[in-house]
Image (cartoon, helix red, strand yellow):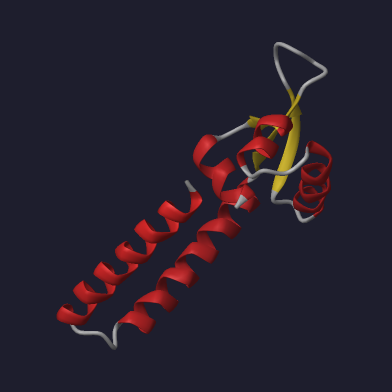
Amino acid sequence: MIMWILLNEGSLPIGQLAKLIDLTPRALTRIVDGLESNGYAMRKPEKTDKRAVNVELTKNGRAFFDEIVLDVTSKFESLFNVLDKREMVELSRIIEKLTDHMKSQIT
């Protein structure tokens, strides 16, 4: 999820990223440490405030994410290929109904 957010948002401060995924900055720091050690993300000092640190994906992180997305997409395609058009429409209707129900439970 962190990689997806960084891919879409670009460079973000650790505190803001932590809020987006509902983690403490300390917990997020551990995750970013792991992403950094794998070469998927890097920390950069904020240009206007040297005490603040932003996190962004590296080229390796983007490549890894792209590979995962392609893999997941192909797995979903093969999974749903068994359904005909009518069944896909019905599945979409059911998922929408469940989503609406979950939303009503949250609020």
Of residues 30 and 57, the one drawn nearer to the viewer in this rendering = 30
Q: In the rendered image, which quarter is residue 28 located in?
A: top right
In the rendering, at what x and y percent does residue 18 appear?
Answer: 70, 38
On the picture, is 84 further left or further right than 13?
Answer: left
In the rendering, at what x and y percent does residue 85 appear?
Answer: 16, 78
On the picture, is 68 further left or further right than 77?
Answer: right
Which residue appears at 31% of the width and 62% of the height? 96
Which residue appears at 78% of the width and 50% of the height? 31
Image mark count:
0
Q: In the rendered image, which quarter is residue 10 located in?
A: top right
Q: In the rendered image, which quarter is residue 65 located in?
A: bottom right
Would you place residue 31 above or below residue 54 in this image?
Answer: below
On the picture, is 102 further left or further right than 93?
Answer: right
Which residue appears at 78% of the width and 37% of the height? 25
Of residues 47 and 28, the one drawn nearer to the viewer in this rendering = 28
Of residues 78 and 16, the one drawn nearer to the viewer in this rendering = 16
Would you place residue 73 above or below residue 105 in this image?
Answer: below
Residue closest to the far top: 48
Residue closest to the far left: 86
Would you place residue 83 above or below residue 88 in this image?
Answer: below
In the rendering, at what x and y percent does residue 19 appear?
Answer: 66, 36
In the rendering, at what x and y percent does residue 51 appear?
Answer: 83, 18
Which residue appears at 38% of the width and 83% of the height? 79
